[in-house]
Image: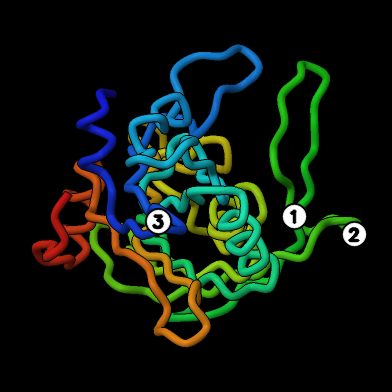
Amino acid sequence: MTPAQIQDRILFRDGLMLIIDKPAGLPVHAGPAGGPNLERHFDALRFGFPKAPSLAHRLDRDTSGCLILGRHAKALRKIGILFQDGKVDKTYWAVVAGSPPAESGRIELTLSKVSNKTGGWRMVGGLPDGQTAITDYVVKGRANGRTWLELTPHTGRTHQIRVHCASIGCPLLGDPQYGGPEGHPLHLHSRAISLPLYPKREPVGAVAPIPAHMRAALAACGFAEDPIHG
């Protein structure tokens, strides 16, 4: 990714934060083995500041869309408190196999990280010592045994949407780890995010354009042309 390419993905910018449109398939930071990651390109987002911005939260490697960066330490603390207090509104779009039990609903299922002997791990729902996790969903459209969902997570657990959708019988396309059909990229997109960054102003935020790999499935479920362009 070139400096121009990451700058082209900026959705919102002011003196405290940036919101960028994270591409699918690229981790936000380097794992134990290193490798390509989004964070290594943040120097191109300084815009005159002495230091590069830093991640205010995370998205999974294969999830696309709105990602907040704090531009300095004071901003990161302020944004972090808003996340901790549940004041950041997040909207995700997903395409899932099957259909949920109702047109809208709330999923409340604890989540626990469980490791195996080979060094891998996965999130497991419903264990008694799990962390509280809550996700609301609304059906936006259906076609050919698939459903387009709008999801609002009220907590920020690892793989929360993926496990919660699987728990109600509709795993995400491209998510075989939790029972979804293989042969697709993960169909999960952080569509919009907003937060009350300034006490006396309206919340600020952004909407991310639909990534190319999700357009056909969403169109089949009734999504019209996206007015938001990347």
Which amino acid does the dot numbered 1 rest on? Leu
Query: Regarding mark 3 in the picture, which secondary structure is present there?
Result: strand
**Does label 3 or label 2 sit earlier along the sequence?**
2
Q: Please report contact status of discs 3 and 1: CB closer than 8 Å, yes or no.
A: no
* Viewer-nearest residue: 39 or 119: 39
Q: Which residue is mark 3?
A: 190
- 32 sits left or right of 55 in the view: right
Q: Residue at x 57, y 50 (%)?
A: 57
Q: CA distance from mark 3 to mark 2?
A: 29 Å
Query: Regarding mark 2 in the picture, which secondary structure is present there?
Result: loop
Residue 129 x/y as whole percent: 90, 56
Residue 173 x/y as whole percent: 39, 45
**Does label 1 or label 2 sit earlier along the sequence?**
1
Q: Residue at x 56, y 23 (%)?
A: 30
Q: Residue at x 61, y 71 (%)?
A: 154
Q: Nearer the viewer, mark 3 or mark 1?
A: 3
Looking at the image, is 116 positioned above or below residue 224? above
- 126 sits left or right of 57 in the view: right
Q: Which residue is mark 1?
A: 111
Residue 192 x/y as whole percent: 36, 65
Query: Regarding mark 1 in the picture, which secondary structure is present there?
Result: strand
Q: Quadrant of residue 167?
A: bottom right
- 68 sits left or right of 84 in the view: left
Which amino acid does the dot numbered 2 rest on? Pro
Q: Quadrant of residue 143?
A: bottom left
Q: Which residue is mark 2?
A: 128
Looking at the image, is 213 positioned above or below residue 134? above
* Viewer-nearest residue: 73 or 227: 73
Residue 73 x/y as whole percent: 61, 49
